[in-house]
Amino acid sequence: MILINRIMIRASVKNPIFYLCKRFHCALRDFDTHSLHMSGCGSDFLAYGPDIVGKGLNRAGKLGVGSVEPFLSQRECVRLPKPITHIYPFPTATFFSANGDIYACGANDVGQLGVGFASPVLYRPTPIHLNRHIKSIVTNGRSTAFLDRDGGWHFTGDNATLQLPSVPIQPAVPVPIPSPAPGMPIRSITFTQPSAAPEEAGAWLTLDSGDVYAVGDNRSGQLGIGKLSGPGGGPGKVLLAGTITRIVSDGWASFFILETGAVYAAGWNKVGQLGVPGSAASVPQPRLICWGGATKVVTAAGCTLITTRDGLLVSGANDRAQLASSSSYRLTLAQTGWPFIVSDVLFMDGSTVILTGGGQIMVMGDNRRGQLGIANVRRIRSAACVPFIRDASYIYCDSGVAHVVAGGRLVALRGGAVQEIF
């Protein structure tokens, strides 16, 4: 292979036969050496055996290359002791699997990486303290659950609000999670999304039987167990007729998607974000809001978007035109009519940022501080395209500011402009 490389380098670039041979050689070389390619949450990784090269978003050092910069436009490399077989990218952390042995980097302020309290931020991959073959990982940025190949789940991080039984308040190394129904293994675990405040945390444990149990904050009925309660009430069962395949929650409003595509909602509904008609502030028993065809739910800041096979539905606060140009201050499962494909949505306080399927950024709602990246407009009543952004691939909110990864750079929407960070 080295000899072929040298021959190709010495040959004439102007020769068309050389060009075709070079393309074939590059494809063969990539097939031979690229063991893994993974992109997610604004970061991009290539693994060559034990060598990892990463670029893109580097929040809390999650690329693992040792850099403290929030974004890297050029690839940098780090080597692990073993070949990498899988990569789990998350918003503020990354887990690397070497045939089940896990190395972690990123935010670790509450011990959520499972490596102990060595540092609040780890800029290099560090082995977790769990002598088990791990085949799946879920995290919300403060709490992490590891699934081993024997079907056992292990927890690390913040358990103060969740109060999982028989689990310490803040374990910095993984500890076993007992099943709420003895003898029935846990199939999957879902946490409230990263935007939820620590005191609003919740978790849902789905058993092999299909039953779902919930723990955590339930002051607004967001766990969907049919009653209101604070943290520490013990696991409660979610009673729904059907198999729950996905759960989405921002810590206030929770949505349960069934295998049929039907959607049930529970929790805080003061501004109508659940899509439940009426004026009930809290809905502790899940209510049916979509009969079928739902594929995705996004909820935050009193607003909800439901993607169905027939279109997009929005519910919640519209007092600053953050959902539609309608004069109504509150919407309930209204059709959007947006003339673009929605890839992701970021709901902030009175403002909405949309990542389209074509890599553009559309915005609407409150813009008094220029927080939508458009100047001299206090309120944007219908979706407007933010200029100077192309090929966007990821959006997130940090300290109330919308950030966009686009075209190999990181930009922020603030002050009525698109400000390049890196």
Image (cartoon, helix red, strand yellow):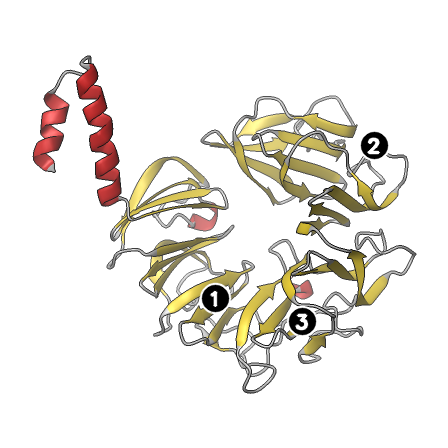
Residue 252 visible to the viewer? no
Pinpoint residue 21: horizontal percent, then vertical percent. 19, 25
In the rendered image, is residue 359 in sight? yes
Disc nearer the start of the sequence (2/3): 3
Q: CA gap, disc 2 to disc 1?
A: 44 Å
Label 2: element kind: loop
115 with respect to 184 (left or right) = left
* Residue labelled with disc 3: 216
Tell me which corner region of the image, top left, top right, bottom left or bottom right, holds residue 98.
bottom left
Image quarter for residue 345? Answer: top right
Q: CA distance from mark 2 to mark 3?
A: 37 Å
Of tags 2 and 1, the one toward the viewer is 2
In the image, residue 364 sits, relative to residue 61, either above or below, namely: above
Q: Is residue 414 left or right of residue 133?
A: right
Q: Tag 1 or tag 2, which sits nearer the N-term?
A: 1
Residue identifier under label 2: 325
Q: Is residue 321 above or below residue 180?
A: above
Q: Residue at x 84, y 52 (%)?
A: 272
Q: Which residue is at the front of the view, 109 or 144?
A: 144
- Foreground label between 2 and 3: 2
Q: Earlier in the sequence, mark 3 or mark 1?
A: 1
Q: Position of residue 388 (x, y in %)?
A: 57, 22
Q: Badge 1: how crowded within 10 Å, few (<14), some, or many (20+)?
A: many
SS under mark 3: strand
Query: Which x, y percent locates residue 109?
Result: 50, 61
Tell me which residue sits at (57%, 30%) in the image. 358
Image quarter of residue 116: bottom left
**Mark 3 crowdedness (10 Å alpha carbons): few <14, some 14-19, many ≥20:** many
Amino acid under disc 2: Ser
Question: Of tags 3 and 1, which is closer to the observer?
Answer: 3
